[in-house]
Image (cartoon, grey):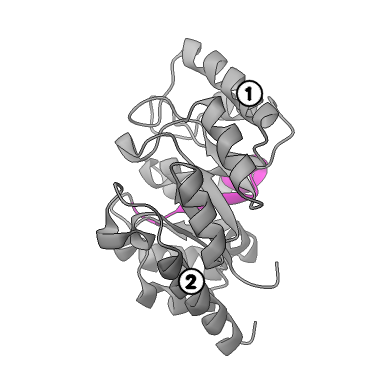
């Protein structure tokens, strides 16, 4: 992509329409922001995909935390396939085992359930050994990793994101920065080679999840990303 990627969290069709109007590149669709984002019903996926020309990646997550039991994995596979049938262009998931390590078995099962590209979400920020997790992530098959660098958000994880991106261009290309992202973080992240950004409450009036996405706030971020990219020679 010639310009930085801007992904917006959507809860319904109106969010997707407004995100597209503001210049977003992609929607991450969730059914609710309870527990930081849970899976939507397949019918909602179909509605949102019909309302926008943007790619829509859909959250696969059924409960609080990043673990699964045996039955949940089977249900998640069924959801993944139903989302593909409903028009989703990608999926978003990430699960950890009882040792707070990436659950390779569940991840592999879900990755092989469809032909859709997928994002490993912020479960990576909750791993016990983040260095070990990042050594594994490039081999899992995801094309992006949504991360704040810290479970507490980008403000706390900024130095970690920058260091990881500077150490390995492959990692820099995988990182999509999100989780309390602020405008003053953008130049630092882009200088490190990070060109994908994820926003949720910050593109809604008063940062409220009860409010629709505001296309003017999306446009402000679009202009900031593009201007910073040009300034840095992108």
The x and y percentages for residue 6 are 54, 62
Magenta-colored stretch includes residue 147: yes
Does dot 2 land on a helix, a strand or a loop?
helix
- Quadrant of the snapshot with the C terminus: bottom right
**Where does label 2 land, which residue?**
219
Magenta-colored stretch includes residue 227: no
The x and y percentages for residue 222 are 52, 72
Relative depth, front residue between 42 and 136: 42
The x and y percentages for residue 183 are 38, 74
Q: CA distance from mark 1 to mark 2?
A: 32 Å
What residue is at 28 percent from the left and 58 percent from the top? 207
What residue is at 46 percent from the left and 68 percent from the top? 163
Does dot 1 land on a helix, a strand or a loop?
helix
Which mark, residue 82? Answer: 1
What residue span does the magenta drawing correspond to?
136-150
Q: Is residue 48 above or below residue 197?
A: above
Q: Is residue 34 above or below residue 53?
A: above
What residue is at 42 percent from the left and 25 percent from the top? 62
Q: Is residue 229 above or below residue 164?
A: below
- Depth check, mark 1 against mark 2: the one in front is 2
The x and y percentages for residue 188 are 44, 77
């Amino acid at each position: 992509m010639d310009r930085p990627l801007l992904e917006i969290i959507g809860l319904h069709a109106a969010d997707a329409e407004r995100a597209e109007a503001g210049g977003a590149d992609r929607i991450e669709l969730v059914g609710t922001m309870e527990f930081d984002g849970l899976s939507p019903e397949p019918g909602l996926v179909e509605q949102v995909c019909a309302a926008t020309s943007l790619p829509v990646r859909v959250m696969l997550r059924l409960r609080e935390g990043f673990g699964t039991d045996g039955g949940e994995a089977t249900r998640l596979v069924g959801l993944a396939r139903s989302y593909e049938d409903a028009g989703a262009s990608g999926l978003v998931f990430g699960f950890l085992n009882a040792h707070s390590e990436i659950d390779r078995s569940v991840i592999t099962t879900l990755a092989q359930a469809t032909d859709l590209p997928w994002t490993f979400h912020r479960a990576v920020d909750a791993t016990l050994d983040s260095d070990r997790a990042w050594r594994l992530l490039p081999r899992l098959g995801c094309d992006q990793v949504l991360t704040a660098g810290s479970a507490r958000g980008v403000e706390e994880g900024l130095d970690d994101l920058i260091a990881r991106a500077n150490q390995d261009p492959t990692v820099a290309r995988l990182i999509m920065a999100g989780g309390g992202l602020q405008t003053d973080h953008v130049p630092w992240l882009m200088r490190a080679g990070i060109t994908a950004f994820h926003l949720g409450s910050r593109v809604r009036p008063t940062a409220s999840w009860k409010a629709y996405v505001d296309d003017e706030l999306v446009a402000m971020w679009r202009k900031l990303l593009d201007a910073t990219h040009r300034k840095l020679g992108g």
